Image (cartoon, rainbow, N blue to C red):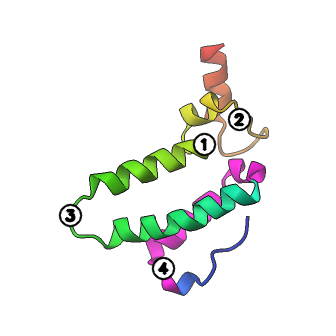
Amino acid sequence: MPELDHPERFLPEVQEWWETWRHSPQSEQFLPTDVQRLKTLTLLVQRIYEMEGADLRAYAELRQQESLLGGTVLDRQRLRMRMKSGSDSAGDDVLDELIG
């Protein structure tokens, strides 16, 4: 996954969000369309951090989009994603054993 284009345009929190996704184990499986989705989401993440007060629709959209990319252990299970052994997502293997 590439570095964030023009990181100086974004808040530090947005840069951290991008780097988290960029270095996530699931990013190894991302296609160019997934990367493009994340690039688009950077604008939404920026908006969330800039706004004063809660915009529940923005949070809901971000949660949904991250879910589609395998953002949580349960999302990865639902998507049948497999992480490499030794990745930071060791909890996925534990969940596999619990679910069967």
**Which amino acid, by three-letter code, is at mark 2?**
Met
**Which amino acid, by three-letter code, is at mark 3?**
Gly
Q: Position of residue 16 (x, y in %)?
A: 53, 68
Marks 1 and 2: in contact by CB < 8 Å? Answer: yes
**Residue at the image point whose x is 20% and y is 63% from the top:** 53
The residue to which callout 1 is attached is 70
Marks 1 and 4: in contact by CB < 8 Å? Answer: no
Label 2 to label 3, Cα distance in Å? 35 Å
Q: Nearer the viewer, residue 3 or 35?
A: 35
Label 1 to label 3, Cα distance in Å? 27 Å
The residue to which callout 4 is attached is 10
Residue 7 within the segment the image draws in magenta: no
The residue to which callout 2 is attached is 81
Q: Position of residue 41 (x, y in %)?
A: 51, 63
**Residue at the image point whose x is 65% and y is 33% from the top:** 79
Label 4 to label 1, Cα distance in Å? 24 Å
Of labels 2 and 1, earlier in sequence is: 1
Quadrant of the rendering where the C terminus is positioned: top right
Magenta region, residue range? 9-30
Label 4 to label 3, Cα distance in Å? 19 Å
Up-down relation of residue 69 to residue 9 (above or below): above
**Which amino acid, by three-letter code, is at mark 4?**
Phe
Label 2 to label 1, Cα distance in Å? 8 Å
Element on which disc 1 rests:
loop
The residue to which callout 3 is attached is 53
**Residue at the image point whose x is 72% and y is 44% from the top:** 87
